[in-house]
Image (cartoon, rainbow, N blue to C red):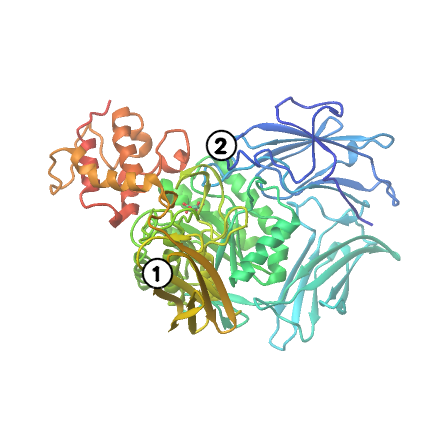
Amino acid sequence: MRQVINLNQGWKFKKQNVGLVERYPKDWQDVTLPHTWNAVDGMDGKGDYDRGSYWYVREFETPKQPLGKGRAYVEILAAGQQASVYINGEKVACHEGGYSIFRADVTEHLNNNHKNLLVINCSNEYKESVYPQSADFTFYGGLYRGVNLICVPDAHFDLDYYGGSGLMVTPKPCGCGGADFHIKAYAAGADENFTVLYSIEDMQGKEVAYGCRPADDSAIVLHVPEAELWDINHPYLYTVTAILQRRNESYDQVSVRAGVRSFSCDPEQGFIINGRETPLRGVSRHQDLLYQGNALTKEDHYRDAKLIKELGANTIRLAHYQHAQEFYDACDEMGFVVWAEIPFISVFNQDPQAHQNCISQLKELIIQNYNHPSICFWGISNEILIGGISEQLVENHRELNRLAKRLDPTRLTAIAHVTMTPMESPMHHITDVISYNHYFGWYGGKMEDNGQWLDKFHELHPSLCLGVSEYGCEGIITYHGPEPACKDYSEEYQALYHEHMAKVLEERPWIWSSHVWNMFDFGCAARKEGGVAGRNNKGLVTMDRKTKKDSYYIYQAYWSKKPMVHLCGKRYAQRAGDTTKIRVYSNQPKVSLYLNGKLAEEKEGNKVFVFTVALEDGRNHLLAVAGEAKDVMSLEKVKKEPEIYVLPEVNQRREGVANWFTTVGHLDLEAPMEFPKGRWNVRCTMEELATSPKALAVVSKAVKLATNFELKPGAGMWDMIKKMTPEGMMDLAGETLPEGFLESINAKLTQIDKE
Ligand code: ADA
């Protein structure tokens, strides 16, 4: 029978590209998997994290095989981002792509009498043909999910096909209340004397179906009468086991879990599961933690999933790559509908090898995760039109879509568009459903633009299923104030923005899915915003998972069935002024607010309850009561609010925007924009403008003022931005900028000669 030996302990690691070692290097650093070398620098804000090619070494003994020679595989659960595997000096595998399982057949290279030397080289160096190439998150390096040794008899369930389990189960509900389980096991090294025995057990461990097929023609359909459906509030899982058998002897065994459900999407009815219209409302998640990087344990994964469940979400977009099996397992068990995707993101590379890399990452994603009932959508790309469209880009998407449908006709394909993707685009007619990432109310435009945009698109494309795959804004729990505004990074503005968005989405059940960007703050070494470098702070929860921001609770009020009440502004603890506003979120119809033991006011409302109270000098105790739910906080009345509540650069930026025109000089901003030959203009790409120091200086200043992004060629998120034009960027910033801003940039640029 199969033996799976965990090899996570006892590794030696060298953060130097020393090349292949021949002996066990006793003096190297001891590490235990999961491990990444970017646990700290991937988010510490120093700007450049270590992207190198480093070495892991471990010894292991050859396990005894009772049935002849058998085969042995080293299974790497993920290696960031490229890896080569060597056993006893021989290269046995290479892998490109940092998020999927891969295996190396090491059988022919094992020593029988002494130890084996397993060496793995991991690299997170930039490689042009491997996705992701440039994106808004840290590309951690290392063996961050663990390594196993799998020993099987010569006849076994296949371990060589794209890291899959060798068992594919497709349960289909039948009209009669039962379900047909279409099952196929892939046997390797088995002749005509082998059979496959199949069994299905329910959640109590009771066998509910049984079948048997010849190993070389193993497909079977097993019927389970009165099958329980897998659903969001009832995530019922069956266990399907395949045993490879020959003359009263079992050779290999694989078990997977499966769920019976039907689902579809409709442009008007939105997402439908088991015949019930169920708008998918939830969050996106990245796989990292503060000073731990992406080296997460099973407990870390389950804690994240639990936090999302407590929020009341029913869907998770697992961005922007394949996540750990433990997380998909947690989603199967807790009843989330999952959008799983590959890291085909931000920058399109025309190189056919890069396309091949997408193909192999998509194959791995689908084959390795086929059985998870939580997954309903395969995402084929994210914001890929940042750098514009081309025929090749469209054709590559068509091919990826065909591939996904061929490998898995049972699920829907999806795509996440960047805001600037036009409403009319060939990209809208490739995948089964589409979705947009919109940041109106943060990078540009007003939050009110969201609803209008969605309605307009829906009207224009009544036959397309539209989702909102990303929306969000930064919230840093140090910053507060009585008048929150876009780009002030305050916890209050983030909460206001999400109050608005939660309502916009609630009012549009036809939107098949929506995903907050993001459930948790995450590491992005290239970022520097809001006084916090190295991270994206759009999470509803901080990166250390210690603090749920106020914005978390607005969604709980909308989505959770459990009675709740939340007093906002707990960290806005010192307040000046005669009166102050107290916002309360609750899913109950009535909230009573008590100030220092006395009832201040009682209000009826829907989710958001706003009270105005006059604090007493010094300490004040507030209590909110809504049905059985209660929440408390303490506020202090002060003469002046602490300076740390306001980020200095916010004021500087506001002043900068206001003073911009005085530095532009006397220009006729009413005149139509001109684009004289031989001069720069706002339709040139950032990359082109960067060839002229003068033009770059104008544009950098404008971009900083408009979007707060630092424009530094070659650094930060340059690769993502370089194909954009100032016109495109300012379009995104929209109405948050004074009129004539774009015209003034153009006027300045057209004064500079191209040379
Ligand atoms: C993009 C991108 C995300 C995310 C976001 C942001 O939309 O898809 O990866 O980081 O931007 O926060 O700006």
N-terminal label among 2 and 1: 2
Q: Label 2 is placed on what type of residue?
A: Glu
> Which of 14 and 754 lies nearest the eye of the viewer?
14
Viewport quadrant of the C terminus:
top left
Q: Quadrant of residue 617?
A: bottom left
Q: Position of residue 571 (x, y in %)?
A: 44, 52
Q: Position of residue 166 (x, y in %)?
A: 70, 51
> Which of 335 and 574 lies nearest the eye of the viewer?
574
Residue 370 in view, yes or no: no
Q: Residue at x 24, y 45 (%)?
A: 737
- Disc 2, disc 1: CB below 8 Å? no
**Circle 2 residue:** 128
- In the rendered view, would you say 559 is above or below 90? below
Gap in angstroms between the C-alphas marked 2 and 1: 52 Å
Whether residue 714 sits left or right of residue 90 in the image: it is: left
**Circle 1 residue:** 581
Say which of marks 2 and 1 sits in front. Answer: 1
Whether residue 61 sits left or right of residue 128 in the image: it is: right
Q: How many marks?
A: 2
Whether residue 542 sits left or right of residue 511 in the image: it is: right
Crowding near pointer 1: few (<14 within 10 Å), some, many (20+)?
few
Q: Residue at x 33, y 48 (%)?
A: 640
Q: Position of residue 506 (x, y in %)?
A: 40, 66
Q: Label 1 is placed on what type of residue?
A: Lys
